[in-house]
Amino acid sequence: MIDEFLSFGSEGWWFLFALIVFARGCDLLSTYLGTPTLMLEGNPIVRRLGWKGGIPVSLLMAMGYATWPLLALSISTTSLLIAARNLQSAWIMRSLGEVNYRMWMADRLAESPRGLPLFCFWGESFLFGIVGVGLMWFAQWQLVPFSVGLGIASYGVAVALFTSWAYWRSGN
């Protein structure tokens, strides 16, 4: 049931807490690999909190999220997808350095036909969203597939929001 809640400290709670900590840890590690100073971080809240604030906040939030399986599974799914996306470019970011990567990416955006990068970012988001919403629809309110579908759809929304925001901030 998607409206099911777990008691703090129960066996199920510990499992979901460990899952969230693992997934958020993957997101944090992949972010650190690509942008250790958080210069390239797309989420303004994470950038503001920094490493010293972000890690304890993530742990505290994981404790609360683990009480609601729907939220725990969807956040874990989204975090793992974000980590995978981060790892796709982290090696380039690290090899060029954060400043050089930012300049290189700005140059690529400037050299692209106007609007094409945004179309591609939104296309990626839309395609992930279709998969997530489709999974939610066909899950017929079963907790696990519905939660995973919600996490995939949430990933699509996050990509659309943060890439669009970065694109518009770059002046394109």
Image (cartoon, rainbow, N blue to C red):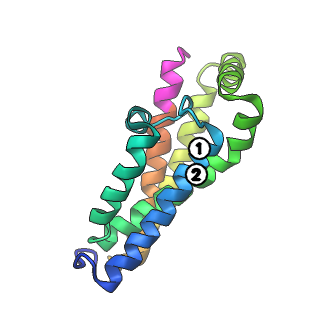
> Of helix, strand and loop, which one carries label 1?
helix
Q: Residue at x 35, y 62 (%)?
A: 62
The answer to whether 74 is drawn above or below residue 162 in the figure is: below
Question: Do residues under tags 1 and 2 come within 8 Å of each other at their CB atoms?
Answer: yes
Would you say 37 lies left or right of 101 here?
A: left
The residue at the far bottom in this view is: 11
Q: Is residue 167 magenta?
A: yes
* Coordinates of residue 25 in the picture (x, y in percent): 51, 58
Q: Residue at x 60, y 49 (%)?
A: 30
Q: Is residue 159 magenta?
A: no
* Coordinates of residue 165 in the picture (x, y in percent): 46, 28
User: Where, quadrant-wise, is the C terminus in this rendering?
Assistant: top right
Q: Where does label 1 land, which residue?
A: 32
Q: Residue at x 34, y 50 (%)?
A: 57
The residue at the far right in this view is: 95
Would you say 65 lies left or right of 44 here?
A: left
Q: Amino acid at mark 1?
A: Tyr
Q: Is residue 133 visible?
A: no
Report the magenta residues as a range: 164-172
Q: Amino acid at mark 2?
A: Leu
Res 46 → quadrant: top left
Q: Which mark is residue 29?
A: 2
Q: Which mark is residue 129?
A: none
> For the residues marked 1 and 2, what is the alpha-carbon distance in whole angstroms?
5 Å
Q: Residues within 10 Å of mark 2 (few under 14, many from 20)?
A: some
Would you say 150 lies left or right of 108 here?
A: left
Q: Residues within 10 Å of mark 1 (few under 14, many from 20)?
A: some
* Coordinates of residue 162 in the picture (x, y in percent): 47, 36
> Of helix, strand and loop, which one carries label 2?
helix
Q: Main secondary structure of the magenta part?
A: helix
